[in-house]
Amino acid sequence: MSERVTLASVADEAGVSLSTISKVLNGRADVSPDTRDRVERLLHERGYVRRGTGRAEAHAELIELVFHELDPIWSMALIGGVEAVAKEHGLSVVLTVNGSRHEPDPDWIDGVIRRRPVGVVLVFSELALEYRERLQARAIPFVIVDPAGDPSPEVPSVGSANWSGGLAATRHLIELGHRRIAAITGPDDMMCSHARLDGYRSAMTSAGLPIDPDWVRWGDFHLDGGRDRARELLALPEAQRPTAIFAGSDLQALGVMDAARAAGLAVPAELSIVGYDDIPFTRWVTPPLTTVHQPLRRMGEEAARLAIRLNREPAASTPRMDLATSLVVRESTAPPPVE
Protein backbone atom coordinates (compact mmCIF):
# COMPACT_ATOMS: atom_id res chain seq x y z
CA MET A 1 0.00 0.00 0.00
CA SER A 2 1.44 3.40 -0.91
CA GLU A 3 2.10 6.07 1.68
CA ARG A 4 -0.58 8.40 0.21
CA VAL A 5 -3.27 5.72 0.24
CA THR A 6 -2.37 4.84 3.83
CA LEU A 7 -2.54 8.48 4.92
CA ALA A 8 -5.76 9.04 3.03
CA SER A 9 -7.29 6.01 4.76
CA VAL A 10 -6.21 7.29 8.17
CA ALA A 11 -7.50 10.79 7.39
CA ASP A 12 -10.87 9.38 6.31
CA GLU A 13 -11.18 7.22 9.43
CA ALA A 14 -10.13 10.07 11.73
CA GLY A 15 -12.48 12.53 10.01
CA VAL A 16 -9.71 15.04 9.27
CA SER A 17 -7.95 16.39 6.21
CA LEU A 18 -4.66 15.16 4.79
CA SER A 19 -3.10 18.49 5.79
CA THR A 20 -4.04 17.76 9.43
CA ILE A 21 -2.41 14.31 9.15
CA SER A 22 0.71 16.01 7.79
CA LYS A 23 0.74 18.48 10.69
CA VAL A 24 0.55 15.65 13.20
CA LEU A 25 3.34 13.72 11.47
CA ASN A 26 5.59 16.76 11.46
CA GLY A 27 4.95 17.74 15.07
CA ARG A 28 3.14 20.98 14.30
CA ALA A 29 1.61 22.73 17.29
CA ASP A 30 -1.57 23.97 15.55
CA VAL A 31 -3.52 20.72 16.09
CA SER A 32 -5.87 20.18 19.02
CA PRO A 33 -4.75 17.57 21.60
CA ASP A 34 -7.84 15.41 20.98
CA THR A 35 -7.27 15.36 17.24
CA ARG A 36 -3.57 14.65 17.67
CA ASP A 37 -4.29 11.74 20.03
CA ARG A 38 -6.91 10.29 17.66
CA VAL A 39 -4.59 10.48 14.64
CA GLU A 40 -1.61 9.11 16.56
CA ARG A 41 -3.68 6.17 17.77
CA LEU A 42 -4.87 5.34 14.27
CA LEU A 43 -1.38 5.66 12.81
CA HIS A 44 -0.15 3.17 15.38
CA GLU A 45 -3.08 0.78 14.96
CA ARG A 46 -2.62 0.75 11.17
CA GLY A 47 1.13 0.17 11.53
CA TYR A 48 2.04 3.29 9.60
CA VAL A 49 5.77 3.96 9.26
CA ARG A 50 6.97 6.94 7.28
CA ARG A 51 9.36 5.97 4.52
CA GLY A 52 11.59 8.21 2.43
CA THR A 53 13.74 7.58 -0.64
CA GLY A 54 16.88 8.13 1.44
CA ARG A 55 18.17 9.27 4.77
CA ALA A 56 18.97 12.79 3.57
CA GLU A 57 15.37 13.30 2.50
CA ALA A 58 13.81 11.77 5.60
CA HIS A 59 16.16 12.90 8.37
CA ALA A 60 18.27 15.85 9.38
CA GLU A 61 21.99 15.05 9.64
CA LEU A 62 22.07 14.92 13.42
CA ILE A 63 21.74 12.76 16.51
CA GLU A 64 19.66 14.10 19.38
CA LEU A 65 21.03 13.45 22.89
CA VAL A 66 18.51 14.02 25.69
CA PHE A 67 19.30 14.40 29.42
CA HIS A 68 16.99 15.26 32.31
CA GLU A 69 19.89 17.20 33.85
CA LEU A 70 23.44 18.03 32.86
CA ASP A 71 25.79 16.86 35.56
CA PRO A 72 29.09 18.67 34.90
CA ILE A 73 31.06 15.52 35.68
CA TRP A 74 29.64 12.27 34.33
CA SER A 75 27.45 13.82 31.60
CA MET A 76 30.54 14.93 29.71
CA ALA A 77 31.73 11.35 29.29
CA LEU A 78 28.44 10.35 27.65
CA ILE A 79 28.40 13.46 25.47
CA GLY A 80 31.96 12.76 24.34
CA GLY A 81 31.07 9.20 23.36
CA VAL A 82 28.01 10.20 21.33
CA GLU A 83 29.85 13.09 19.71
CA ALA A 84 32.79 10.91 18.62
CA VAL A 85 30.54 8.41 16.84
CA ALA A 86 28.41 11.15 15.29
CA LYS A 87 31.56 12.75 13.87
CA GLU A 88 32.64 9.42 12.36
CA HIS A 89 29.36 9.37 10.42
CA GLY A 90 29.33 13.03 9.40
CA LEU A 91 26.56 13.92 11.85
CA SER A 92 26.09 16.73 14.35
CA VAL A 93 24.77 16.37 17.90
CA VAL A 94 21.81 18.29 19.28
CA LEU A 95 21.75 18.37 23.09
CA THR A 96 18.38 18.65 24.84
CA VAL A 97 17.77 18.94 28.60
CA ASN A 98 14.19 18.02 29.46
CA GLY A 99 12.00 16.09 31.89
CA SER A 100 12.65 14.12 35.08
CA ARG A 101 15.12 11.28 35.62
CA HIS A 102 12.41 8.82 34.55
CA GLU A 103 11.37 10.23 31.16
CA PRO A 104 11.17 13.44 29.08
CA ASP A 105 8.28 15.91 29.33
CA PRO A 106 5.41 15.80 26.78
CA ASP A 107 6.62 18.96 25.00
CA TRP A 108 9.86 17.23 23.98
CA ILE A 109 8.24 14.77 21.57
CA ASP A 110 6.82 17.49 19.28
CA GLY A 111 10.22 19.13 19.01
CA VAL A 112 12.10 15.97 18.10
CA ILE A 113 9.51 15.12 15.45
CA ARG A 114 10.05 18.55 13.87
CA ARG A 115 13.82 18.10 13.96
CA ARG A 116 13.67 14.56 12.51
CA PRO A 117 17.13 13.39 13.63
CA VAL A 118 18.82 10.24 12.36
CA GLY A 119 18.34 8.85 15.86
CA VAL A 120 17.70 9.78 19.48
CA VAL A 121 19.83 8.81 22.48
CA LEU A 122 18.05 9.31 25.82
CA VAL A 123 19.66 9.24 29.27
CA PHE A 124 16.52 8.18 31.13
CA SER A 125 15.17 5.12 32.90
CA GLU A 126 12.23 4.70 30.54
CA LEU A 127 10.37 6.07 27.51
CA ALA A 128 6.57 6.09 27.62
CA LEU A 129 4.74 3.82 25.16
CA GLU A 130 3.05 6.86 23.60
CA TYR A 131 6.41 8.45 22.78
CA ARG A 132 7.79 5.19 21.42
CA GLU A 133 4.82 4.78 19.09
CA ARG A 134 5.11 8.34 17.78
CA LEU A 135 8.82 7.96 17.05
CA GLN A 136 8.36 4.54 15.47
CA ALA A 137 5.60 5.87 13.20
CA ARG A 138 8.11 8.38 11.81
CA ALA A 139 10.99 5.90 11.54
CA ILE A 140 13.04 7.81 14.15
CA PRO A 141 15.05 5.18 16.06
CA PHE A 142 15.76 5.71 19.75
CA VAL A 143 18.11 4.14 22.29
CA ILE A 144 18.15 4.58 26.05
CA VAL A 145 21.55 4.95 27.68
CA ASP A 146 20.76 3.46 31.00
CA PRO A 147 23.21 4.05 33.82
CA ALA A 148 20.26 4.43 36.15
CA GLY A 149 17.30 2.17 35.43
CA ASP A 150 15.91 -0.90 33.73
CA PRO A 151 14.02 -0.06 30.52
CA SER A 152 11.13 -2.10 29.19
CA PRO A 153 12.11 -5.18 27.15
CA GLU A 154 10.78 -3.46 24.01
CA VAL A 155 13.20 -0.51 24.32
CA PRO A 156 16.68 -0.63 22.72
CA SER A 157 19.16 0.19 25.49
CA VAL A 158 22.79 0.29 26.56
CA GLY A 159 23.49 -0.17 30.27
CA SER A 160 26.14 -1.47 32.62
CA ALA A 161 26.48 -4.35 35.06
CA ASN A 162 25.32 -2.62 38.25
CA TRP A 163 24.91 -5.79 40.32
CA SER A 164 28.42 -6.98 39.45
CA GLY A 165 29.81 -3.58 40.37
CA GLY A 166 28.24 -3.65 43.81
CA LEU A 167 29.45 -7.21 44.31
CA ALA A 168 33.05 -6.38 43.34
CA ALA A 169 33.18 -3.29 45.55
CA THR A 170 31.95 -5.16 48.62
CA ARG A 171 34.10 -8.23 48.01
CA HIS A 172 37.17 -5.99 47.88
CA LEU A 173 36.36 -4.64 51.33
CA ILE A 174 35.67 -8.12 52.68
CA GLU A 175 39.00 -9.38 51.32
CA LEU A 176 40.75 -6.55 53.16
CA GLY A 177 39.27 -7.91 56.38
CA HIS A 178 36.27 -5.62 56.92
CA ARG A 179 33.21 -7.09 58.57
CA ARG A 180 31.14 -4.01 59.40
CA ILE A 181 30.47 -2.69 55.90
CA ALA A 182 27.76 -0.13 55.16
CA ALA A 183 26.21 0.84 51.82
CA ILE A 184 24.85 4.20 50.69
CA THR A 185 22.99 3.55 47.47
CA GLY A 186 20.94 5.89 45.26
CA PRO A 187 17.24 6.83 45.20
CA ASP A 188 14.79 4.08 46.08
CA ASP A 189 12.88 4.57 42.79
CA MET A 190 15.85 3.81 40.53
CA MET A 191 16.66 0.26 39.48
CA CYS A 192 20.42 0.79 39.52
CA SER A 193 20.22 1.74 43.21
CA HIS A 194 18.63 -1.62 43.95
CA ALA A 195 21.01 -3.53 41.64
CA ARG A 196 24.13 -2.08 43.29
CA LEU A 197 22.66 -2.72 46.72
CA ASP A 198 21.79 -6.30 45.73
CA GLY A 199 25.42 -6.82 44.72
CA TYR A 200 26.48 -5.58 48.15
CA ARG A 201 23.99 -7.89 49.88
CA SER A 202 25.12 -10.87 47.80
CA ALA A 203 28.78 -10.32 48.68
CA MET A 204 27.99 -10.00 52.38
CA THR A 205 25.72 -13.06 52.42
CA SER A 206 28.12 -15.28 50.49
CA ALA A 207 30.87 -14.33 52.98
CA GLY A 208 28.61 -15.26 55.88
CA LEU A 209 28.55 -11.70 57.19
CA PRO A 210 25.50 -10.17 58.89
CA ILE A 211 23.95 -7.01 57.46
CA ASP A 212 22.80 -4.64 60.17
CA PRO A 213 19.70 -2.81 58.85
CA ASP A 214 21.25 0.45 60.08
CA TRP A 215 24.13 -0.03 57.63
CA VAL A 216 21.91 0.37 54.52
CA ARG A 217 21.05 3.94 53.54
CA TRP A 218 19.24 5.42 50.53
CA GLY A 219 20.94 8.49 49.06
CA ASP A 220 20.56 10.65 45.96
CA PHE A 221 23.84 10.01 44.05
CA HIS A 222 24.98 13.56 44.93
CA LEU A 223 27.67 14.81 47.31
CA ASP A 224 25.28 16.19 49.94
CA GLY A 225 23.37 12.91 50.07
CA GLY A 226 26.57 10.97 50.66
CA ARG A 227 27.69 13.37 53.38
CA ASP A 228 24.35 13.33 55.21
CA ARG A 229 23.96 9.55 55.13
CA ALA A 230 27.59 9.06 56.20
CA ARG A 231 27.08 11.36 59.19
CA GLU A 232 24.23 9.11 60.29
CA LEU A 233 26.36 5.99 59.90
CA LEU A 234 29.36 7.46 61.71
CA ALA A 235 27.12 8.56 64.60
CA LEU A 236 26.26 4.94 65.40
CA PRO A 237 27.69 3.44 68.61
CA GLU A 238 31.36 2.52 68.17
CA ALA A 239 30.72 -1.24 68.27
CA GLN A 240 28.12 -0.87 65.52
CA ARG A 241 29.82 1.83 63.45
CA PRO A 242 31.03 0.59 60.04
CA THR A 243 34.73 0.40 59.28
CA ALA A 244 34.03 0.64 55.54
CA ILE A 245 31.37 2.27 53.35
CA PHE A 246 30.43 1.39 49.78
CA ALA A 247 28.93 4.50 48.18
CA GLY A 248 26.73 4.02 45.12
CA SER A 249 28.36 6.92 43.25
CA ASP A 250 31.68 8.76 43.33
CA LEU A 251 29.96 12.00 44.32
CA GLN A 252 28.42 10.26 47.32
CA ALA A 253 31.85 8.79 48.15
CA LEU A 254 33.30 12.30 48.22
CA GLY A 255 30.52 13.27 50.62
CA VAL A 256 31.49 10.29 52.79
CA MET A 257 35.10 11.52 52.80
CA ASP A 258 33.92 14.93 53.95
CA ALA A 259 31.84 13.41 56.75
CA ALA A 260 34.81 11.28 57.84
CA ARG A 261 37.08 14.33 58.05
CA ALA A 262 34.44 16.18 60.08
CA ALA A 263 34.24 13.21 62.46
CA GLY A 264 38.03 13.16 62.86
CA LEU A 265 38.43 9.79 61.09
CA ALA A 266 41.40 9.13 58.83
CA VAL A 267 40.74 7.58 55.39
CA PRO A 268 41.63 4.75 54.94
CA ALA A 269 43.32 4.03 58.31
CA GLU A 270 40.05 4.33 60.24
CA LEU A 271 37.43 4.21 57.47
CA SER A 272 37.69 2.65 54.02
CA ILE A 273 35.57 4.07 51.18
CA VAL A 274 34.66 2.69 47.74
CA GLY A 275 32.80 4.76 45.14
CA TYR A 276 31.08 4.00 41.86
CA ASP A 277 31.47 5.52 38.35
CA ASP A 278 35.23 6.30 38.17
CA ILE A 279 34.70 9.93 37.19
CA PRO A 280 37.97 11.57 36.10
CA PHE A 281 39.00 13.53 39.20
CA THR A 282 38.60 10.62 41.64
CA ARG A 283 42.24 9.72 41.02
CA TRP A 284 43.32 13.21 42.15
CA VAL A 285 41.42 13.54 45.43
CA THR A 286 43.21 12.81 48.72
CA PRO A 287 43.38 9.92 49.13
CA PRO A 288 42.72 8.76 45.54
CA LEU A 289 39.37 6.96 45.48
CA THR A 290 38.94 3.22 45.06
CA THR A 291 35.90 2.91 42.82
CA VAL A 292 33.93 0.83 40.33
CA HIS A 293 34.59 1.88 36.75
CA GLN A 294 31.39 2.39 34.79
CA PRO A 295 32.25 2.81 31.07
CA LEU A 296 30.20 5.96 30.51
CA ARG A 297 31.98 7.15 27.36
CA ARG A 298 31.70 3.73 25.74
CA MET A 299 28.01 3.60 26.72
CA GLY A 300 27.51 6.82 24.75
CA GLU A 301 29.47 5.44 21.82
CA GLU A 302 27.54 2.17 21.67
CA ALA A 303 24.18 3.94 22.00
CA ALA A 304 25.00 6.28 19.11
CA ARG A 305 26.20 3.39 16.94
CA LEU A 306 23.03 1.47 17.70
CA ALA A 307 20.77 4.42 16.84
CA ILE A 308 22.56 4.90 13.52
CA ARG A 309 22.37 1.19 12.74
CA LEU A 310 18.64 1.09 13.52
CA ASN A 311 18.13 4.06 11.21
CA ARG A 312 19.66 2.11 8.35
CA GLU A 313 18.15 -1.28 9.06
CA PRO A 314 15.55 -1.97 11.77
CA ALA A 315 16.45 -4.91 14.00
CA ALA A 316 14.43 -8.13 14.04
CA SER A 317 14.52 -8.10 17.87
CA THR A 318 15.08 -5.42 20.48
CA PRO A 319 18.84 -4.88 20.91
CA ARG A 320 20.07 -4.54 24.50
CA MET A 321 23.64 -4.29 25.72
CA ASP A 322 25.10 -4.37 29.24
CA LEU A 323 28.75 -3.32 29.42
CA ALA A 324 31.07 -4.74 32.05
CA THR A 325 32.10 -2.78 35.14
CA SER A 326 35.48 -3.22 36.85
CA LEU A 327 37.03 -2.40 40.21
CA VAL A 328 39.75 0.27 40.28
CA VAL A 329 41.78 -0.01 43.48
CA ARG A 330 43.45 3.19 44.67
CA GLU A 331 44.27 4.48 48.15
CA SER A 332 40.94 5.02 49.94
CA THR A 333 40.74 1.40 51.10
CA ALA A 334 42.91 -0.54 53.56
CA PRO A 335 42.50 -3.27 56.20
CA PRO A 336 40.30 -2.24 59.15
CA PRO A 337 41.87 -0.83 62.31
CA VAL A 338 42.90 -3.41 64.88
CA GLU A 339 40.38 -3.57 67.71
Image (cartoon, helix red, strand yellow):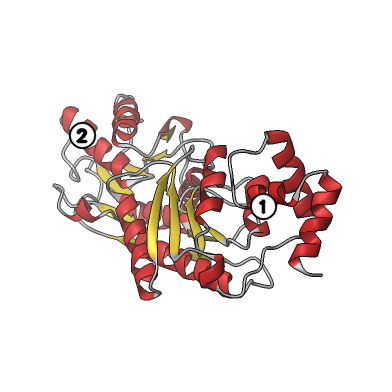
Quadrant in the rendering for residue 71: top left
Q: Nearer the viewer, residue 214 or 254?
A: 254
At label 2, the amino acid type is Asp
At label 1, the amino acid type is Ser
Measured as percent of width and height from the top left, residue 303 is found at 47, 64
Measured as percent of width and height from the top left, residue 180 is found at 36, 40
In the picture, measured across the screen, residue 264 lies left or right of residue 128, that is: left
Q: Nearer the viewer, residue 238 or 52?
A: 52
Q: Nearer the viewer, residue 337 or 132?
A: 132
Q: Nearer the viewer, residue 223 or 93?
A: 93
Q: Is residue 300 above or below residue 39?
A: below
Helix, strand or loop status at disc 1:
helix
Which residue is denoted by mark 2 in the rendering? 258
Label at residue 22: 1
Measured as percent of width and height from the top left, residue 119 is found at 51, 62
Q: Is residue 332 above or below residue 185?
A: below
Label at residue 121: none
Measured as percent of width and height from the top left, residue 78 is found at 36, 57
Residue that sits furthest to the right in the current view = 13
Residue at point 20%, 34% (across, down): 258
Position of the N terminus, as image quadrant, is: bottom right
Q: Are marks 2 and 1 in contact (CB under 8 Å)?
A: no
Residue at point 80%, 57% (across, down): 8
In this view of the protein, can residue 332 be seen by the observer? Answer: yes
In the picture, measured across the screen, residue 112 lies left or right of residue 82, that is: right
Position of the C terminus, as image quadrant, is: top left
